[in-house]
């Protein structure tokens, strides 16, 4: 099984994600020269000790045995870190990365599953040390995922992370030759990704749960907007220093629901960058899943949709 394997856009994946209140599942196909098609989706509300039952029901309803299947780790189940790439042959890369990470994890390196993702350097610059993402998760967490899906008879091929799922959606939005900032929200907080050419360059978690942004009085919402603006500006300044060869075209906000328009206006007034709200229906064919016309539904399934946009390529 490929763990955290790198992926670009393709067809025919069934993606699942465990959320605080249940399990979301999406099946996406990728016909040539047209928008990705959301073939099927479902949400299974959480019940006490029901994860096995949820997966078994999902397997039956999605006919999962006929699909390439992927799931995502949740925030807190893994770490993603930027490290300097070791100057070693490709076959020794993961061993070298494990050595570098041994003092960066709060558990023993032998208990970690590790994968790496390259961060492309400036092709026009002199050769220099490059960076890469190192992704680490406890072996126990990975094993539990594998066993749960095996018990439900779902042929799990890949365990992914939200950063890569969001990168897949960003690839549908990037203007040719320019970079894109994409910011999404869920119950755990916000995820910012900065991409270019379908590659992930920067990712950052922002401690700003969706509820804090869309509920409460005007003063608390303005305070949330202030904090998001500050965190974004810091990340954009860092990106500009580290990757000056990439020009960002715009910042896109993932589906938010109530409060999205206010945040969009606030950021547009305070950042030197075009800010847009994303409608999932503008990049996916949702004719077979009309429930995705609802912005709340778009927000729930956003990262799961991204996880379903997969195409295997060489893993480092």
Image (cartoon, rainbow, N blue to C red):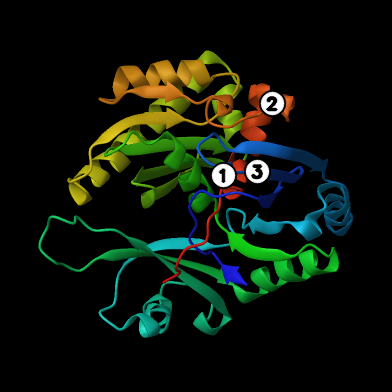
Q: Is residue 259 left or right of residue 152?
A: left
Mark 2 → mark 3, Cα distance in angstroms: 12 Å
Mark 1 → mark 2, Cα distance in angstroms: 18 Å
| Corner quadrant of residue 85 | bottom left
Residue identified by numbered label 3: 28
**Picture residue at 19% right of the left edge, 55% below the top:** 122
Position of the C terminus, as image quadrant, is bottom left
Query: Dot 3: few (<14), some (14–19), or many (≥20) neighbours within 10 Å?
Result: many
**Picture residue at 12% right of the left edge, 57% below the top:** 125
Viewer-proximal residue among 243 and 216 = 243
Residue identified by numbered label 2: 287
Q: Are marks 1 and 2 in contact (CB under 8 Å)?
A: no
Mark 2 or mark 3: name the one nearer the start of the chain: 3
Query: Dot 1: few (<14), some (14–19), or many (≥20) neighbours within 10 Å?
Result: many
Q: Is residue 26 left or right of residue 215?
A: right
Q: Position of residue 146 (x, y in %)?
A: 72, 69
Q: Position of residue 55 (x, y in %)?
A: 83, 55
């Amino acid at each position: 099984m490929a763990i955290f394997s790198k992926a670009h856009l393709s067809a025919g994946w069934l993606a699942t994600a465990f959320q605080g209140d249940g399990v979301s599942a999406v099946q996406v196909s990728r016909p040539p020269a047209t928008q990705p098609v959301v073939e099927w989706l479902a949400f299974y509300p959480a019940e006490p000790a029901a994860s096995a039952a949820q997966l078994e029901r999902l397997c039956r309803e999605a006919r999962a045995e006929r699909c390439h299947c992927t799931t995502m780790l949740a925030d807190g189940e893994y770490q993603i870190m930027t490290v300097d790439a070791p100057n070693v042959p490709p076959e020794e890369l993961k061993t070298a990365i494990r050595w570098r990470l041994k003092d960066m994890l709060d558990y023993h390196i032998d208990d970690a599953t590790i994968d790496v993702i390259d961060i492309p350097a400036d092709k026009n610059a002199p050769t220099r040390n490059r960076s890469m993402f190192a992704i680490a998760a406890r072996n126990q967490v990975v094993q539990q995922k594998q066993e749960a899906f095996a018990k439900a008879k779902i042929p799990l091929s890949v365990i992914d992370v939200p950063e890569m799922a969001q990168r897949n959606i960003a690839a549908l939005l990037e203007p040719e030759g320019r970079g894109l900032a994409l910011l999404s929200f869920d119950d755990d907080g916000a995820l910012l990704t900065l991409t270019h050419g379908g590659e992930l360059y920067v990712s950052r978690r922002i401690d700003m749960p969706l509820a804090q942004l869309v509920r409460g009085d005007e003063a608390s919402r303005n305070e949330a907007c202030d904090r998001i603006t500050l965190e974004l500006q810091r990340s954009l300044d860092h990106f500009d220093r580290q990757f000056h060869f990439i020009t960002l075209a715009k910042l896109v906000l993932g589906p938010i629901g109530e409060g999205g328009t206010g945040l969009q206006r606030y950021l547009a007034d305070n950042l030197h960058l075009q800010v847009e709200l994303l409608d999932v229906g503008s990049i996916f064919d949702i004719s077979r899943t009309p429930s995705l016309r609802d912005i709340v539904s778009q927000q729930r399934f956003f990262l799961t949709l991204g996880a379903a946009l997969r195409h295997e390529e060489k893993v480092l």
